[in-house]
Amino acid sequence: MPGANDVVQKPKIFLQFEEQSQKPGWHTNSKFLSALEILQDTSISDMDAILTLVDGAGSAGQMPAAMSKHFKEHWLGYPNDTNHYWKGIKTEKLLRAGMRLVCETFQQAASAGTQKPCEYFWVNGRTMGSKRWEVVVAEGVKHITVLFVTPVPTYNGPPPSTQPNPKIRKVFPDSSDNAVVQPIEEP
């Protein structure tokens, strides 16, 4: 779970998945089934599977070009590792397996009669040099929570500017051991 030095963010790139998972019957929608098929198809490489989904979302108008470029360069290290946030970590394997698990969990719950919307969070730890990169999928009674737990991103240049998100708050001790409530900062 997130520690005192972790940063919790709502990755805007996954907001479309959150919105789609709230649509009644989404688990039977042809776009959802096509994405799940791509994630499950072992004849497609991990990178090609994720790129196909990102490019498909872009061409369908679901992902702005700048967001697609950001995801490819920073989250996947594509087409080269120059701007990859986590050099040396094969994030495409983890993203594919994690998103497949999310989709399968969502589909199983909906097929059993309880459609559970998904909510995504990105937790990045403040331990420089860490190789901890995980996708956590937690199925609750009424929703599915997805956590991308990553090392601190390494930026090729200055990190993006941030702004407070009042909808996500953290409680932590200050230097006098008083409990402080503060909104998290998001890029």
Image (cartoon, rainbow, N blue to C red):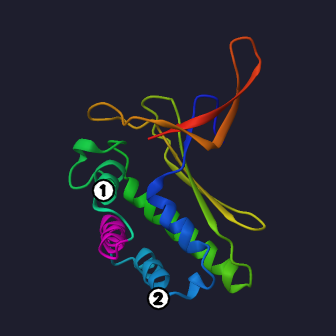
Q: Counting residues from the N terminus, which is met first, the one under dot 2 or under dot 1?
A: 2
Front residue of this view, candidates 171 and 43: 171
Q: How many numbered circles are shown?
A: 2
Residue 101 seen anywhere in this rendered image of the structure = no
Q: Which residues are magenta?
A: 45-61
* 159 sits left or right of 16 in the view: left
Front residue of this view, candidates 29 and 152: 29
| Residue holding disc 1 | 72
- Mark 1 is on which residue type? Lys
- Mark 2 is on which residue type? Ser
Q: Is residue 17 magenta?
A: no
Front residue of this view, candidates 150 and 158: 158
| Residue holding disc 2 | 30
Expressed as whole percent of the image width and height from the top left, the position of residue 123 reads: 55, 43
Expressed as whole percent of the image width and height from the top left, the position of residue 184 reads: 58, 36
Q: Secondary structure at mark 1?
A: helix
**Residue under the point 36% across and 37% down:** 160
> Is the stretch drawn in magenta largely helix, strand or loop?
helix
Expressed as whole percent of the image width and height from the top left, the position of residue 48 reads: 30, 69
* 106 sits left or right of 98 in the view: right
Q: Secondary structure at mark 2?
A: helix
